[in-house]
Image (cartoon, rainbow, N blue to C red):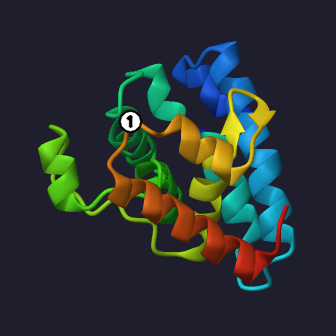
Amino acid sequence: MPDWAKIPPEEVLREAGCSRKVIAHCRAVRDCACEYAARCPDADFSLVETGAWLHDIGRSIDHSIRHAQAGADLLRSHGFPEPVARIVECHLGAGLTAEECTALGLDARDCMPRTIEEKIVTHADNLIAGTTRVTIKESLASASHLPEEIRQRMYRLAQEVESRCGRA
């Protein structure tokens, strides 16, 4: 098994079999996340950059909601540090509790973003539709199929990241 931790994240995405469309999305999320991280003195910029690049690596395996846990497991199997795997695992919407994961047919894991790096990448992913930057209001409107509680969590996450790091 190649040591993916020693090659650039964009190459890791290619090696995993991600499409050009997924890689372009990951690049856009990386750019957005790095804007926040650059203004957030308590954030590990390198961790944000790597986590943002790799947040959708699980789409090389599955395009459903399962991609987050699958991507985290894939990175763990390739020796990536746990903080990177956790960013991947927690990036959906505003995270999922273990109970929500179970209700969705996922492994019962706490997939709530807790660190500033996890929160920045999650928020940046919410602001990128494909490769296009959107507002949090547009993101929430496109998430109208989700329960109100989850949309409120997404909004609170946006407020927290922007109050700690400023608007990107």
Q: Amino acid at mark 1?
A: His
Is residue 164 shown left or right of residue 55?
A: right
Instruction: Answer with left or right where residue 119 lies relative to residue 64.
Output: right
Measured along the vertical axis of the image, is residue 128 above or below residue 135?
A: above
Picture coordinates of residue 14, whole percent (x, y): 64, 21
Could you tell me which residue is drawn at 44 percent across and 64 percent down? Answer: 153
Indicate the quadrant containing the N terminus: top left, top right, bottom left or bottom right: top left
> What residue sits 53% from the left and 70% below the top?
156
Residue 122 spot, x, y in % from top left = 57, 55
107 or 83, which is in the foreground?
107
From what the image shows, is residue 145 above or below residue 130?
A: below
Q: Quadrant of residue 112?
A: bottom left
Q: Residue at x 61, y 43 (%)?
A: 139
Quarter holding residue 8? top right
| Residue 111 visible in this rendered orientation of the protein | yes
Which residue position holds label 1? 145
